[in-house]
Structure formats: C-alpha cells, structure tokens
Image (cartoon, rainbow, N blue to C red):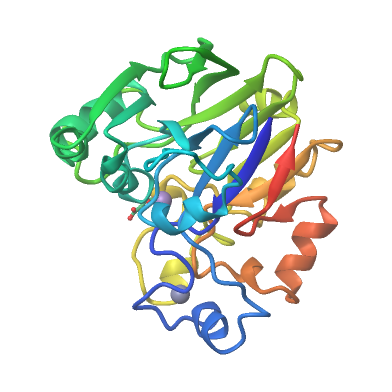
Amino acid sequence: MHIVLLGTAAGGGFPQWNCWCPTCRTARTDPGEARPRTQSSAAVSADGARWFLLNASPDVREQLRMLPAPVPAGVRHVPVEGIVLTDAELDHTLGLALLREARHLQLWATDAVHRVIAHDSRILPVTRAFADVRVEELVPDRRTGLCYRDGTASGLRVTCIPVPGGPPRFASEERPGHTVGLIVEDERTGGSCAFVPGCGGLDDGLLRRLDAADLVLFDGTFWTDDELIGLGIGERTARQMDHLPVSGPGGSLAQLGKLAGRRRVYTHINNTNLMLLEHGPERAEVERAGLVVGADGMRFTL
Ligand code: MLT
Ligand code: MN
Ligand code: ZN
C-alpha cells in the first residue's frame, strides 16, 4: 500500500491567512525553519495509480498534483476512486464539492457524519447537483472493502474506530460516530495504517488498536492544552476542542512514545503548534520520543 501525506496542517493551513502568531510569522519570513503546510488529508493506493482520499480538504486541488499517476490516454482522468471521511468538519469535507467534476464519486462515512454533510453543511447535496455520489456507511469495528469506481475490489479494507470527539459546531444533532479513526489494511501485503487526525483522548483500548498498525498518523493539533488561550486567540482548551495535546502528562507524545517499533507521525497540526519549528526544543522532544512531525508530501509504502 502506498500512502502520501497530502496535507498535514489543521483547519486554516500553515501559515493561516489571518494569523501572525510566532510560528505563522516564521513560516512567512523563514519557510526553511517552518515549512508551509496545506490542510490535513492523506491518500492511499494499492497500485500507486488509483487513489482513495482520507478526508477531502479545501486544498485538494493543489494536493492532487502530489499523486504519482500515469499520463492518461483520454481527455478526462480521475485519479481519485473515492473518499473516506473521519468526521464532517469543514477542513475534512469542503474538498468533496471541489471534486464535483469527477461526475462519479464514492464516499465512505459513518451514519452520523453522513447526516451532517447531508442536512447541516449540505456539502453532499451540493456536490450531488454535479456528480453522482455513492455513499457507503462505515460501521464501527466492521471491515469494509474499498472498491474502485468500476466496482472491482482494490484489495484495501477500512475499519473505523470511534474516538472521543463531538459533532462539528454546525451540526443539528449529536449522535455516536461523529469522529472516528481509520485503519486501512492491504490484503495483499498485510500492511496497515492508522489515520486519526482528530482525537480527544487516548485510552488503552485505542492504544492497542494503534499498536497493531505498521504506521500511525495521529492528531498533532496542539502542543499544549491552553495553547490558544495563552496566545489570546481562543477561549477553549485543546481537550475542549476534542484534540488531545501533544505535550505534558497524559499527552499523546507520552502515550504514543510507548508504541516503540511503530512508525508514528503527527498530522493535522495547528498553525500555533511550536513543534512546527524545525530546530526548536519541541521538535527535538517529539523526535526523542521516536515520533515524526508530518510534512506535506511524505510518502510511505507498507
Ligand atoms: C477541528 O479540528 O477541531 C475542526 O476542524 C475545527 C474547525 O474546523 O474550526
Ligand atoms: Mn480540523
Ligand atoms: Zn498562527
């Protein structure tokens, strides 16, 4: 299985257009020290030519240029076979409408996420005005085969695991399954990848699931719990926003640090997070624990 990190920033990207926090300033003046990043999304493929997106970001148009794909013979060519969603947040779903030219798309989402994009953000009916979109429900802990648009099996399977996380703020109802992590497995190679860009907490059960994956792509939104409050740009803690902070006791670094032998990479990194600085003490702390701060364009083969 081929995996490409298409985007590794949280909503707003890095630098964020209206932000002049220390890290956004650095990204503008010294991009070698703080590499710009697009909004979080990844692509997986069994054959390196036909891809499934894990979330569809508002930056999808530029991101698709990163995918290796053969020069097509025809006039139109759609390298995206389908999209698997972890939640209905705008930074993970606005890209659906931007893929409407595909004319035919497939989507995998939980019932809770499906309802929000159907009735609240209405991204699904808007996209459906242009393209035929087949939606298949993701049921927690049940494996689903990812098939190509022509109906043939790709050999990739996805399982969703509910993680702590509420609905987006524009959702009209609260149900289970608003936020899930994804485990993508390749039947042929046996390789597996966990994709968890939003996660409000880690318990032993979830850690065990992650420990079984060859590659773990995990929520790196905030460095500290009070990051936005400290900068004077927000009122809610990281945990209140359903993002377990990276640092500190009980933080994701301490917990993921225990999964030695697994490749562990942070993604969905907020523009304020100090681990974005290439040579800062926060980056060194992440690397000492054996983890990697994800960057756009990173590739893995499992
Ligand atoms: C999040 O990651 O918590 C959401 O994307 C928030 C947002 O889009 O504002
Ligand atoms: Mn987000
Ligand atoms: Zn910023």
Of residue 243 and residue 132, the one placed in the foreground of this image is 132
Q: Is residue 111 visible?
A: no
Of residue 291 and residue 61, the one placed in the foreground of this image is 61
User: Is 55 on the left or on the right of 167, as rendered?
Assistant: right
Q: Residue at left 48%, top 50%?
A: 64
Q: Measuring from the top left, give residue 94's x and y in whole percent.
A: 30, 48
Q: Is residue 79 visible?
A: yes
Q: Measuring from the top left, give residue 167's x and y in whole percent.
A: 30, 37
Give the vertical position of 275 relative to 249 (above or below).
below
Q: Residue at left 48%, top 43%?
A: 198
Quarter of the image holding residue 108?
top left
Looking at the rendering, in which quadrant would you find the N terminus?
top right
Give the vertical position of 55 relative to 17 (above or below).
above
Q: Measuring from the top left, give residue 32's x and y in whole percent.
A: 67, 80
Q: Measuring from the top left, give residue 298's x and y in whole percent.
A: 68, 53
Q: Residue at left 21%, top 40%?
A: 123
